Image: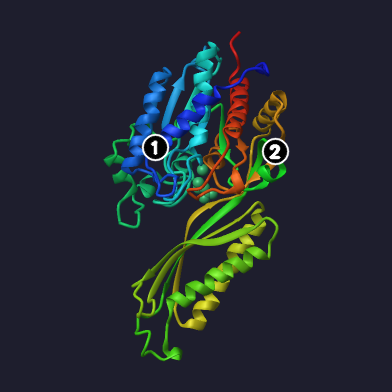
Amino acid sequence: MAAPGENLRINSDRLWDSIMEMAKIGPGIAGGNNRQTVTDEDGEGRRLFKRWCDAAGLEMGVDEMGTMFARREGTDPSLPPVYVGSHLDTQPTGGKYDGVLGVLGGLEVVRSLNDLGIKTKHPIVVTNWTNEEGARFAPAMMASGVFAGVLDQADVYEHTDKNGKKFGEELERIGWKGTEKVGDRKIHAFFELHIEQGPILEDEGIDIGVVTHGQGLKWLQVTLTGKEAHTGSTPMPKRRNAGLGMARVIELVHEIAMDYQPDAVGAVGHMEVYPNSRNIIAGRTVFTIDIRSPEKEVLDAMDGRTREGIDTICDALDIQYKIEQVGHFDPVTFDAGCVKAIRDAAERLGYTHRNIVSGAGHDACWINRVAPTAMVMCPCVDGLSHNEAEEITKEWASAGADVLFHAVVETAGIEA
Ligand code: HGY
Ligand code: MN
Ligand code: MN
């Protein structure tokens, strides 16, 4: 399809103002956001997004996982749409841009097409995927995973948060459980704009990340069971300390990741200690191991070594363990045609660009299984994300949205 002229750009002020407006919903305690999935704040953010989509003349559909699909008609409505979007849910101590830039960047594409009076052959659908973060309800990329047929809807409806609330019930409670069957929609191509969440683009002074691959991920939830006992009167050799077990596993995960540098990563970010009393030896600990690598063989090796190590640690401490895999996707190779559309757009617009592998998981990683998919990345300050201090510049946001605009419009085809 014909490419848009290089002078076609989005409205930078409107995009930035919309991001700042959305940031007012579910504020954090340090300048970021706490708009976790299917909370009241998520519901409020969804309503704001819908008002903006209504104002842009888009037709809203919502599926049974709450994912929002805002459709701009094409001159040939029978053609499968080009989808563009990301997620509006945040981490509990999240930033203003993770996910939001991609959803509102997609809305800006449509708003700019409306301003310019441009019609596309394929319809365009701006998308807000439910529960990308997986922070409140595991796993991450939940709704896109159900859409791609890799997660079971009835199962994830039953997943609970730390207060025992069920995902499906919470989705219904906030009024965003739609009626559309998940995964029925046909996608011509999917594009996602996202902040890098790492330091490469900023360190190299590059405007645009052309995302060729996404690294694979495994989340292993571990439960260690020892015995609660008095921290003062229990002799050391008689202790069955689940807290000590967790500490050794955390060290093990770090050591294994360090064995596969420069790309592999590993950490434990979620930890629960019971009964969590100052003078009781921890009888039970529950924590989640997050290991990732761009290479499947490495990810599998890390998984195997981690499981062996946990067995050895627990044997030595006389504690029991249970390991549940609560998240997983293999490394992803994005669609060459979509990647080229992004690279050509950056080139045409005069933005510096480089190929990059996504360190974080994204909805695009799942949608890539059912449709040609690619991602555009912009830098973020100090590579910081999943931190309320997450920051980007207006220029970075605009450059990313310009490239998204061109890639989407070229793929959707301009009606002369
Ligand atoms: O965990 C991830 O990579 C994503 O931010 N949910
Ligand atoms: Mn994200
Ligand atoms: Mn995130």
- Which secondary structure lies at badge 2? loop
Viewer can see residue 123? no
User: Dot 1 surroundings within 10 Å: few (below 14), some, or many (20 or more)?
Assistant: some
Q: Nearer the viewer, residue 167 or 251?
A: 251
User: Dot 2 surroundings within 10 Å: few (below 14), some, or many (20 or more)?
Assistant: some
Q: Residue at x 54, y 42 (%)?
A: 391
In the rendered view, tell whether residue 381 sits above or below residue 2: below
Viewer can see residue 261? yes
Q: Residue at x 70, y 38 (%)?
A: 206
Q: Furthest residue to the top?
A: 416
In the rendered view, tell whether residue 177 sits above or below residue 240: above
Q: Position of residue 32 (x, y in %)?
A: 45, 45
Q: Nearer the viewer, residue 183 or 345?
A: 345
Total number of numbered discs in the rendering: 2
**Residue 24, label in figure:** 1
Q: Nearer the viewer, mark 1 or mark 2?
A: 1
Q: Position of residue 169 (x, y in %)?
A: 29, 45
